[in-house]
Image (cartoon, helix red, strand yellow):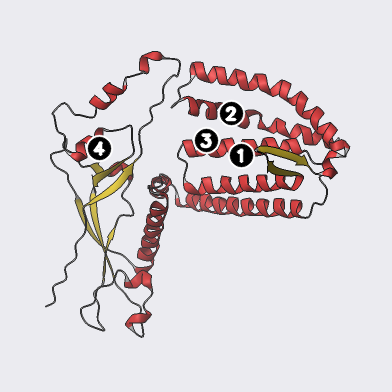
Amino acid sequence: ANLYQKTFLLTKHRNRKKIRNEKNLLDTTNKTSSVEGETAIIPPNGDISPLTVASRNTTHDQLLLYAKPSLTLQIVPVELQFPQRQSIPPQFSMHMDWYSDYEYYPILYNSEFWIMTDHLVEVNGTIDESVTEMRIEHVPMWKWQLMSQMEQTWANQEKMTGEEDSSNDMFRTMLMETNPYLLAVTAIVSVLHTVFDILAFKNDISFFRGKKSMEGLSLRSMVVNTFFQVVILLYLADNETNFMVLMSNGVGLLIEIWKISKAVKISFEGGKIHWEEASSYKMSKTKEYDEIATSHLLFITMPLVAGYGLYSLVHQKHKGWYSWILNTLVGFIYMFGFVMMTPQLFINY
C-alpha cells in the first residue's frame, strides 16, 4: 500500500496595522506621554517574548503570528483525462501529487476560504491553548476550482498591497448571510457599476480629446473638481479603503489632471511655476463669466466649510489633525459639492 503524507500549517503570519484611536482633538485629557506609551508595551506579568511585545505595540505596524481556528481538508477527485503530464494546467498540477509517472492521488487541498480575520487567534505569551477544528469533506471539481481560484486571487492581492483586504471578509459574510437572489442582484449591479464607470471614463476622454477650443468650458470648475478628487483619494487612503476603490478614484484623478492639461500649459522656469491658459479660453467671454461665478461662489462656500470644520472639531472624534482636515473637506464635498456645477451653468446661461 502507498503511504500518502502531506504537511499543512496551522498558523499564519499576518501584518497588523497600527491602531489609531479616535479622540476629541480639543480634549487634552486624552494625551499621554511617549514614556507611558513605551512602558505600556511591557505586560504586567513581565513576559518580554518577541511575540508578546509585538502584540502590545499598537503604535506601529506589526507582523504577528496567528493560529487558524480550523483545518478544512478538501478531497477533490480529478475526473479529467490529460494526454501527458506536461499538458496539465498549472491550476491543477500545483495541487497534484503523483505516485508513479502516470498515476496520481486525488487532490487533497487545505481550504482557508471561510477563515475570517476575526476568527484568527493571536499567538503570544497570554494564551495557554488554542483549539483547531478539523474537517474533511469531498468537494466536486467545479466548486473546488471556484474557491481555490478566489483564494489565489486574494493571496495575490495581499502580496501586492502587503496586507489582506478587509473587503474579503465582507465578501465571505455576504455569501454566508445574504439571500442567494439578493446576492445575484448585488453581483449584477456591481458589474454594471464597473461597466458604467469605464464608459464614463471613455466618453470623458473622447470628448476632451476631440475638443479643439476651451470656449464655453469652466476651467475653474475643472481645477476645483480635481482638488475634490485629490481630497477624496487621500480620505479613502486614510481610512484604508480597499485597493479596487482606490484604483478607480486614482484613474478618475488622472483623467481630471489630463483634462486640465488640455486647457492650461504649465512650465517651470527659474524655480517658478508658470500657468498659461489656452488662447481659446483666455480670449473669450468664457473666462470673464467663469471668474464672476467662481468669486461669488467662494463667498458662499467658504463660511460653510469653516462652519462645518468647527462643528466637526468640537462635537466629533478624529484620529488626528490630518484626519480632521480630510473629514471636514470630504464632508463638505459630499454635502455641497454639487454647487461646483454653478460656474458651468452660469457660462451656459
The residue tagged 1 is: 229
The earlier-in-sequence mark between 3 and 1 is: 1
The earlier-in-sequence mark between 3 and 2 is: 3
Residue 235, numbered circle? 3
Residue at the bottom extreme of this rendering: 83
- The residue at the point 18 percent across, 29 percent down is 43
Left or right: 289 in relation to 147: right
The residue tagged 2 is: 329
Q: Which of the two discs, 4 and 2, sits closer to the camera?
A: 4
Q: Amino acid at mark 4?
A: Ala
- Tag 2 secondary structure: helix
Q: CA distance from mark 1 to mark 2?
A: 11 Å
The earlier-in-sequence mark between 1 and 2 is: 1
- Tag 4 secondary structure: helix
Left or right: 1 in relation to 154: left
Q: Amino acid at mark 3?
A: Tyr
